[in-house]
Image (tube, rainbow, N blue to C red):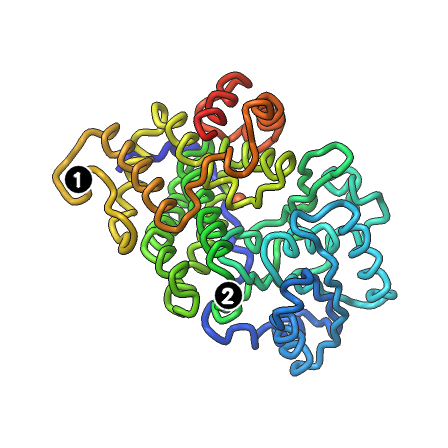
């Protein structure tokens, strides 16, 4: 396969250490203790706390002799104010000693935790934590415990935080805030409701596909990304239909992690640029926003990434539920372009099977908002990785196609 353009130089960091499997949450305490730290700030959100999931992590820490302070005031799409409150909590817990940060939740608590870990030891306004010149000390060590299978936030050091004044996302963190360990326990995801399971699964799929298509695509990342596509396409509809299916939950949690590893060396692209704008301007949850625009973005990028998309279409061969996609999924060789079109059909069929195939109008987005979304998307740094350069007018056309 020569589908994936390979740059002349790629660096792949093996962090975080991965601990994966049912019951893995018990390892959180020993991992923190092995860092030489006896106190932890557990960063989570009210929903995860109310579901009792944070309490399981707290118990695992206590069993290993690690004292826990809980900070559970992270909002969905965390803001700079959330981070400031977390930094204050971390500094109180730190009190001149050692402290680890244990991030428990979906993308929001993990993103906030990175900024909190860095802000706790760097006396600058949290807004400046994206500036290497302002950051003098490495962040507190982070152990990440994802409770949804989607963001892959446990694989990288950058937290996406909303600057509510500027109405845009900022990326806070650095290499020191890559979690030292990612503890993937699928039992923690059994209670995730079907719509969230569907949306987060589509987020993971989007990470894998944008990684494969990125200007910085490479074959190391492609290995992880293609496996992630296989796992999401094979198991997402099952997990949406039966949230207690531990095998499906396990495979999705691993898929999200692999897609996260893939995007770490490639970046993302246009779907995320538009998706961030949709969350900021229309309040649409991240994964749901991505699912609504992904087919249109794939069609836009298809002319310059036909071979990579064809490879991704092949990774859908294990799809086991939902309507059969149009086209020949098992036959002989077809043109690269035909295979790439099949990817768009497969993605649309999977999205329909899990109920995320809504038009933007259904979420309250009308034509009047399109120019604002397009302007936001071209200003988002993530668009730099998109394989096909996109003008503001072209982005507006992609969004309009998803209306
Ligand atoms: Fe994402």
Camera-side residue: 196 or 3? 196
Residue 180: x and y in percent read 61, 60
Residue 27 lies, in percent from the top left, at 57, 74
Residue 20, above or below 388: below
Residue named by callout 2? 189
Q: CA distance from mark 1 to mark 2?
A: 35 Å
> Is there any visible trace of residue 116 in the rendered image?
yes
| Residue 294, horizontal then vertical, whole percent | 43, 36
Q: Mark 1–mark 2 contact, CB under 8 Å?
A: no
| Residue at image point 37% right, 28% down | 299
* Camera-nearest residue between 394 and 36: 394
Viewed as shown, does residue 226 lie left or right of 190?
left
Residue 316 placement, left or right of 280:
left
Asked whether mark 1 and ligand 1 are closer than 8 Å, the reply comes as no
Q: Residue at x 64, y 62 (%)?
A: 47
Figure quadrant of residue 373: top right
Say which residue appears at 38% left-offset and 45% top-offset. 351
Tell me if mark 1 has few (under 14), some (14-19) or many (20+) residues whose alpha carbon lies within 10 angstroms of its own.
Answer: few
Of residues 203 and 355, the one drawn nearer to the viewer in this rendering: 355
Quarter-wise, where is residue 221 in the image? top left
Numbered circle sitting on residue 328: 1
């Amino acid at each position: 396969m020569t589908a994936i353009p390979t740059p002349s130089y790629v660096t792949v960091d093996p962090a975080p250490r991965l601990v994966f499997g049912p019951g893995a949450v018990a390892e959180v305490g020993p991992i923190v203790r092995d860092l030489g730290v006896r106190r932890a700030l557990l960063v989570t959100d009210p929903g995860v706390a109310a579901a009792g999931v944070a309490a399981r992590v707290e118990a695992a820490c206590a069993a290993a002799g690690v004292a826990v302070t809980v900070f559970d005031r992270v909002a969905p799409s965390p803001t700079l104010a959330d981070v400031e409150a977390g930094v204050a909590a971390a500094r109180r817990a730190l009190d001149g000693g050692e402290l680890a940060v244990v991030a428990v939740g979906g993308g929001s608590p993990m993103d906030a935790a990175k900024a909190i870990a860095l802000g706790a030891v760097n006396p600058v306004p949290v807004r400046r934590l994206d500036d290497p010149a302002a950051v003098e000390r490495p962040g507190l060590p982070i152990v990440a415990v994802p409770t949804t299978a989607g963001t892959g936030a446990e694989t990288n050091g950058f937290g996406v935080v909303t600057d509510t004044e500027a109405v845009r996302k900022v990326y806070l963190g650095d290499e020191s805030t890559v979690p030292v360990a990612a503890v993937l326990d699928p039992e923690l995801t059994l209670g995730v409701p079907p719509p969230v399971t569907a949306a987060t699964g589509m987020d993971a799929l989007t990470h894998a596909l944008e990684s494969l298509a990125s200007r910085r695509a490479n074959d190391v990342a492609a290995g992880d990304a293609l496996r992630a596509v296989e796992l999401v396409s094979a198991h997402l509809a099952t997990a949406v239909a039966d949230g207690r299916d531990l095998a499906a939950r396990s495979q999705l949690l691993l898929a999200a992690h692999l897609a996260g590893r893939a995007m770490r060396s490639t970046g993302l692209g246009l779907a995320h640029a538009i998706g961030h704008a949709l969350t900021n301007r229309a309040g649409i949850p991240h994964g749901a926003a991505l699912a609504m625009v992904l087919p249109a973005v794939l069609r836009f990028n298809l002319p310059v990434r036909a071979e990579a998309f064809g490879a991704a279409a092949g990774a859908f061969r294990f799809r086991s539920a939902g309507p059969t996609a149009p086209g020949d999924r098992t036959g002989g060789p077809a043109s690269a372009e035909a295979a790439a079109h099949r990817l768009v059909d497969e993605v649309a069929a999977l999205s329909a099977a899990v109920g995320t195939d809504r038009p933007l109008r259904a979420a309250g987005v009308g034509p009047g908002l399109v120019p604002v979304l397009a302007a936001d998307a071209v200003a988002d740094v993530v668009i730099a990785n998109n394989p096909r350069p996109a003008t503001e007018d072209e982005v507006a056309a992609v969004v309009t196609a998803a209306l």
